[in-house]
């Protein structure tokens, strides 16, 4: 639980989640405030939740992000219209002066860093409708979009012999990289590049297994 | 190969290993053999990890495979080992078959110069694009393209 400071008569206990919502609106919500309505939840739903705890004028400023909360509470008294809020400058940092594709890109990268790929893809698709020639957005979309799958008529061994060699010899070569083919050592060394050079020199017809011996 | 209602479900089979002999930690996982068509000189083992969003390889392997650490938008990925900075790139990864056909998949690979925790095949980066099944009785990994 977080105590929201201000006029003692206006103090109210908030859950941590509510406090987070007031201090730091979600990215989709922030995007709405710069006019990208399609990226977030309907703002009117958030306003109604905050109204109960921000309907006193003194509430907000002591925790630093309260200006947004006051704005939202005021806006809840009338029909919501998306607009650029003065308080979003503090929340969005240097990007607020030019809220173009760079901002959306940052948001998508934030999602990707959390592994939220499906939603990142969906948002990126929508952003690309607005910025269809943005190279950075296109490049990122290509990197995360579902790619093609092709069958190839190639078969490898089950590597039983290689695994047996690793089990028998790993204690003698800890920390080394090794390339093995059918239980034979093709190359062994301190770094993988050296080992791959050894493999290339042998000009093998089959593909060796490489592994670092921990 | 496996069939579903009389129709082929998978097209390739390989042996998976649930305990890699080179791994001293003894941690069990599903290790399958992969190769990269752009670099035919080697194959290696990677863990099938549906909890990982992307494929990720040890930095030394990524370097040897010629991945660029500067090609793409940098982002921070949350991992059990902490936050790692890198970028997502598209690479073709081959799931190697011992029987049937191998699969070449355009995968999303998280490339970083700061990863020494093993090789992983992630869900959104690769696994969501294929059919796969495991038979623990024979340590068989079956895979194939989506219909």
Image (cartoon, coloured by chain):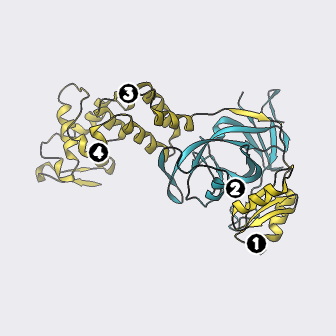
Chain colours: A yellow, B cyan
Mark 2 packing: few (<14 Cα in 10 Å), some, or many (20+)? some
Q: Position of residue A84 (x, y in %)?
A: 24, 33
Task: Please tell me which residue lies in front, A195 or B48.
Answer: A195
Labels 2 and 1 touching (C-beta < 8 A):
no
The residue identified by callout 2 is: B29
Residue A94 numbered mark, or none: 4
Q: Is residue B78 left or right of residue B142?
A: left
Percent position of residue A46, x then y: 30, 35
Q: Which residue is mark 3?
A: A38
**Is the C-beta separation of discs 2 and 3 under 8 Å?**
no
Q: Is residue A93 above or below residue A75?
A: below
Q: Chain of mark 3?
A: A
Q: Which residue is mark 1?
A: A173
Q: Quadrant of the N terminus of chain B?
A: top right
Residue at mark 4: chain: A
**C-alpha separation, residue under disc 4 versus residue under disc 3:** 23 Å
Mark 4 or 3: in front is: 4
Q: Do discs 2 and 4 belong to a common subunit?
A: no
Callouts 4 and 3 close, C-beta under 8 Å: no
Is B145 or A21 nearer to us in this picture?
Answer: B145
Q: Crowdedness of circle 1 by 10 Å Cα count: few (<14), some, many (20+)?
A: some
């Amino acid at each position: 639980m977080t105590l929201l400071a201000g006029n003692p008569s206006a103090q109210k206990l908030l859950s941590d989640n509510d406090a987070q919502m007031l201090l730091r609106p979600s990215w989709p919500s922030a995007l709405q405030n710069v006019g990208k309505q399609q990226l977030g939840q309907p703002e009117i739903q958030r306003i109604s939740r905050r109204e109960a705890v921000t309907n006193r004028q003194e509430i907000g400023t002591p925790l630093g992000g309260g200006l947004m909360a006051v704005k939202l509470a005021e806006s809840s008294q009338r029909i919501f219209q998306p607009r650029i809020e003065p308080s979003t400058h503090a929340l969005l940092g240097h990007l607020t002066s030019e809220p173009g594709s760079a901002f959306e890109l940052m948001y998508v990268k934030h999602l990707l860093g959390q592994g939220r790929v499906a939603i990142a893809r969906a948002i990126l698709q929508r952003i690309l409708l607005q910025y269809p020639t943005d190279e950075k957005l296109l490049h990122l979309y290509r990197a995360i979009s579902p790619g093609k799958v092709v069958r190839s008529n190639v078969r490898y061994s089950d590597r039983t012999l290689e695994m047996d060699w690793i089990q028998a010899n790993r204690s003698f070569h800890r920390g080394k990289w090794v390339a093995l083919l059918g239980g034979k050592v093709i190359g062994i060394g301190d770094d993988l590049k050296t080992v791959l050079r050894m493999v290339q020199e042998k000009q093998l017809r089959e593909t060796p297994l490489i592994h670092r011996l921990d | 190969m496996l069939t579903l209602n009389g129709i082929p479900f998978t097209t390739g089979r390989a042996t998976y290993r649930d305990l890699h002999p080179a791994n001293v930690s003894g941690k069990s996982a599903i290790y399958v053999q992969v190769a990269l068509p752009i670099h035919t000189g080697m194959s290696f083992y990677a863990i099938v990890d549906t909890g990982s969003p992307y494929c990720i390889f040890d930095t030394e392997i990524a370097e040897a495979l010629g991945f660029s650490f500067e090609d793409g938008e940098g982002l921070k990925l949350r991992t059990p080992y902490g936050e790692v900075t890198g970028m997502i790139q598209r690479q073709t990864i081959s799931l190697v078959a011992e029987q049937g056909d191998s699969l070449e998949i355009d995968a999303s690979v998280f490339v970083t110069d700061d990863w020494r925790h093993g090789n992983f095949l992630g869900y959104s980066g690769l696994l969501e694009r294929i059919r796969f099944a495991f038979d623990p009785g024979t340590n068989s990994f079956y895979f194939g393209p989506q219909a």
